[in-house]
Image: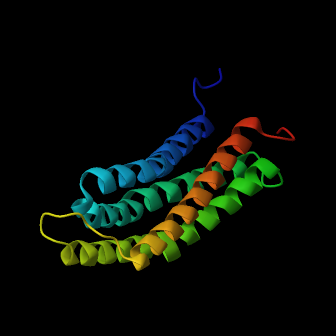
Amino acid sequence: MAPAILFYDIVLAVHVMAVVVAFGVTFAYPVIETQIKRLQPRALPTWHTVAAKVDGKLVTPAAALALFAGVYMASDRELFDRIWVQVPFAALIIIFGAVGSFLTPQSRKLAELAARDVAASPGDGAVTWSAEYEALSKRVAAVGAVMGGLILLSIFLMVAKPGGY
């Protein structure tokens, strides 16, 4: 009698859960930042600090788990030659690089710049963001959007499996 559930299926579930945990929150980042900037601009330094912490303590470990589970599944079924495995694998490596070398350090820098701009603003008045803050914020948003696109492309490819198994 065949087992009711295969180890591969457990790994697949772990892989999907890890992707949701790692990347689901990142799609909310632009909405959260926009609302904080509009409603509580003085809290923006805290937001950027929190985003950097979430990247390091949630996104990266969960993405690593997704990677390990994905490698196991591709190895188990000999799928490394499939485009729907290769592209997401490459995308995940790019995302790891972008998070570690750009997004997390720049979130920390945004926290510093935002704190400086808040401190330079009148105590109860509007906060004026420096050109440096605005430029860096736009760069981080652009890179984040590209990473989001890579995530969505990867999900599409893994679900649609062009070329089949």
Residue at x 26% of width, y 50% of height: 39
Residue at x 87% of width, y 41% of height: 163
Q: Is residue 89 above or below residue 108?
A: above
Q: Position of residue 47 (x, y in %)?
A: 30, 60
Q: Position of residue 38 (x, y in %)?
A: 31, 52
Q: Nearer the viewer, residue 128 or 74?
A: 128
Report the quarter where the C terminus lies. top right
Left or right of 4? Residue 118 is left
Q: Position of residue 61 (x, y in %)?
A: 44, 59
Report the quarter where the N terminus lies. top right
Residue 50 lies in what quarter of the image? bottom left
Q: Residue furthest left?
A: 123
Residue at x 57% of width, y 28% of height: 5
Q: Is residue 39 above or below residue 93?
A: above
Residue 43 lies in what quarter of the image? bottom left
Res 78 seen here:
no
Res 2 seen here:
yes
